[in-house]
Amino acid sequence: MTILIKQSTIETFREVLKKKQRDFKVIVNISGGKDSTFLLDLCLRYLGPKNIDAIVYIEVPGNTHQLNVELVHKIIDYYNNFFDVKEKFVHIKKPGCYCHEHREIEDFWTYMQRHAEIPYCHKARWCMYKMKFNYLGEFIEEMKWPKRKIVTIAGIKLSDSKFRKSRYQEYVGKLMPGAIQSHEWVPYGYFAIPILEYTTSEIWSYLKIVVPELYNELKRVYDEYGDTLNCIFCPFKDKSTIQKHARHDDIRRFLLEKLSKIEPKKEQSRKVKERWMKILKAPNLEIPI
Ligand code: SF4
């Protein structure tokens, strides 16, 4: 089987290289999932490690499973054998965000509980900008890299959701200028999205052929858990993924305990909570893994 790399990937990488030649810093975001592993693979092979300044992995405080952390380190170890990526790898792990109202650091669950806000749509994804963008920003500041001279590469696909299809269609093969709004992925420099046009099955096929060891590991985790648990809870997960989480007693208990402590104020947040609680408590949990 021939593996075709889409023209839009090549065009996006050309644009990234043009920025790199103008002293931009290039950051590849990974999460341990199949999409970001595919993204990292393409970046290493087609952009080249010398054109990548950092490979950044961010834990969401209190909501990232240890399994995800271990998986990311396996992926980095694997690529380190071929591309010497360890020195570029940045693992960001913070205890949470400082809350001026409560004068304390709050992790994902404490924040939700105290502020009664379960994220429910793209614009309400406080977790994304509080616990991912902020940390990425802090890293860029620590490195003393000018924020306007950053290209952040991420593994988003048009087929992920209707929102993504309408939001990112115009950036196929192009760079997206950094966004000001907090619900956008990256508020700095430029955003490169080289895998927009791939389908899930194309990504699995690529991984199976090109990196079978990683494919086997990722497939096992997806079959068993539904995804790789960079966020254990996420309002955007579908029913079958939540059901797979629920088959693991430790994860089911953890989620039920955490969610039961939250009393959402907004109608949309309440619906997200009810949906999760209903699936987690459903009696179909005897299905063998
Ligand atoms: S994956 Fe979901 S829960 Fe995690 S940061 Fe993004 S929107 Fe929030």
Image (cartoon, rainbow, N blue to C red):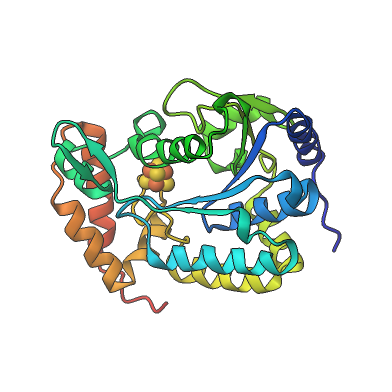
Image coords of residue 59 (percent x, y): 41, 53
**Residue 86 lies in quadrant:** bottom right
Judge whether 30 appears above or below 269 on screen.
Answer: below
The residue most toward the bottom is 288
Give the quarter of the figure containing the N terminus.
bottom right
Residue at 77%, 50% in the rendered image: 48
User: In front here: 136 or 12?
Assistant: 136
User: In front here: 23 or 249?
Assistant: 23
How many discs mark residues in the rendered view? 0
In the visual, does 51 lie left or right of 188?
right
Judge whether 142 appears above or below 232 on screen.
Answer: above
Image coords of residue 89 (percent x, y): 58, 55
Image coords of residue 245 (percent x, y): 36, 64
In the visual, does 114 lie left or right of 21?
left
Image coords of residue 53 (percent x, y): 65, 45
Tell me if I can see residue 115 in this picture: yes
In the visual, does 206 lie left or right of 230?
right
Judge whether 24 appears above or below 258 on screen.
Answer: above
Give the quarter of the figure containing the C terminus.
bottom left
User: In front here: 96 or 226?
Assistant: 96
User: In front here: 80 or 192?
Assistant: 80
Looking at the rendering, the quadrant in which ligand 1 lies is: top left
Tell me if I can see residue 236 in this picture: no
Residue at 57%, 72% in the rendered image: 217
The residue most toward the right is 2
